[in-house]
Image: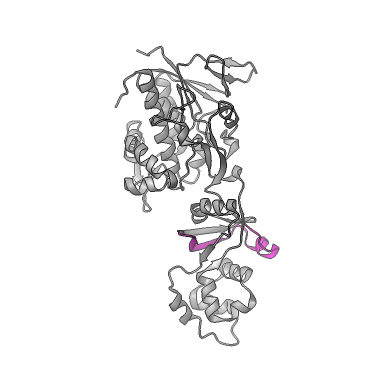
Amino acid sequence: MKDETRVAVVGCGPAGLMAATVLSQAGLSVDLFEAKGSAGCKFLIAGRGGLNLTHSEQAEAFAARYGNNAEIFKKLLAVFSPGDLRAWLRGIGVETFVGTSGRVFPKDASAHDILKIWIETLGKHGVVFHYHHRWQGFSKTGAPLFLPEDGTLREFPARAVLLALGGASWPQTGSDGSWAALLAARDVHLEPFRPANCGIEVAWSEHFRTRFSGKPLKNLLLRCNDRQATGDVVVTAHGLEGGPVYALSGVIRDLLGKGSPVPLLLDLKRDLPLERLKDKIAHRRGKESLANFLRKTIHLAGPAYSLLREICSPEDLQEPTVLAGCIKNLTIPVVNTRPLAEAISSAGGVAFAEVNADLMLRKLPGVFVAGEMLDWEAPTGGYLLQGAFTTGHLAAQGILKWLGRPAKP
């Protein structure tokens, strides 16, 4: 039997859908509101390159991926862990496996498959979906307000509200951050939105941009201050993209914000120690071109060699010791990060100080927040989705506690 207590969940991304799952399984009447015409738009985009659901890392290391919020996420992940997520997925018929990098993927299901099963499961539990309903804040009585397609403002009688409206990246998916003004008007403190997991801008020459845009730079090591990341990078018309760049983009962003120099160093031959590299390039024949010499001696060619020429002076390239230093520590002249709208995720949003341990807003009792609306960031690799799933689960548990309802295990 359904409880007549009605809960409004606003946002049909992973956090909102997970919250609706917990609440409906506990027997509450749940209504899901979504500004777009379908659910899980950003979730589907995340699945385009292979849906990385979470990671198999140990709890301590996993929590550390959330940076300044590591201690907070250590507690959150204890409530709903990567193992719990995999068990839940198994419960709806989706098996997962751990890849060679430790990342967790669905075995025989796409993002579209999972979303379809999920929505059908919620429907069987009585969850009602309201698409094309944009949240407009609260009425004088505290009820959530929605603007449907017909333009008539609607007040919904909910005993509790869970907001899971996303951050401010990929606004075309619905996570445009427009909700921030509504909460700020209620005196909720928000940190400014900032791009996370984004590319960087470099002022390439027209020749380099035209010839090498879209070309990969393989097996690199990138360093910025005390952070480093390895992998492949892609040259773009604007600068550089790719996993290692995304992993360091938060550090780069913060340095740029302070007006500090950005010491982004790129190691083009990370498997070759500096001293061995010096030995290899110390005996160049006089008539042999540098391009041919480096290609034959250390297998450096294509975009990597041209990147050396793009950044280093002709004099540096002719001096073997300096050349070796450039190959191992090539300073990339970063101009900026790519815009927030292009970022994979965003930092900023509702400060954790504004919510209690159950993710309820201190200034708006009965209103809970989950997902990227909260001010946290994490690298790609499963940590972003796990953060959304976990905070959605915890906020739903908080609603059950607030309403005095027992939660199903």
Residue furthest left in the image: 409
* Residue 45 colored in magenta in the image: no
Residue 166 at x, y percent in the picture: 52, 34
Q: How many marks?
A: 0
Q: Is residue 80 above or below residue 314?
A: above
Residue 150 at x, y percent in the picture: 64, 17
Per the rendered image, the range of residues in magenta is: 202-226
Residue furthest right in the image: 206
Residue 179 at x, y percent in the picture: 57, 30
**Which color scheme did the rendering employ for the protein?**
one colour
Q: Classify residue 19 as left or right of residue 212.
A: left
* Residue at 54% from the left image edge and 81% from the top image edge: 320
State which quarter of the image contains the N terminus: top left
* Residue at 52% from the left image edge and 69% from the top image edge: 329
* Residue at 41% from the left image edge and 48% from the top image edge: 65
Residue 107 at least partly seen = no
Residue furthest bottom in the image: 286
Q: In this view, does 290 lie above or below 212?
A: below
User: Residue 391 appears in which quarter of the rendering?
Assistant: top left
State which quarter of the image contains the C terminus: top left
* Residue 209 colored in magenta in the image: yes
Residue 405 at x, y percent in the picture: 34, 18
Q: In this view, does 18 lie above or below 86?
A: above
Residue 216 at least partly seen = yes
User: Residue 403 appears in which quarter of the rendering?
Assistant: top left
* Residue at 39% from the left image edge and 31% from the top image edge: 357
Q: Classify residue 35 as left or right of residue 57.
A: right
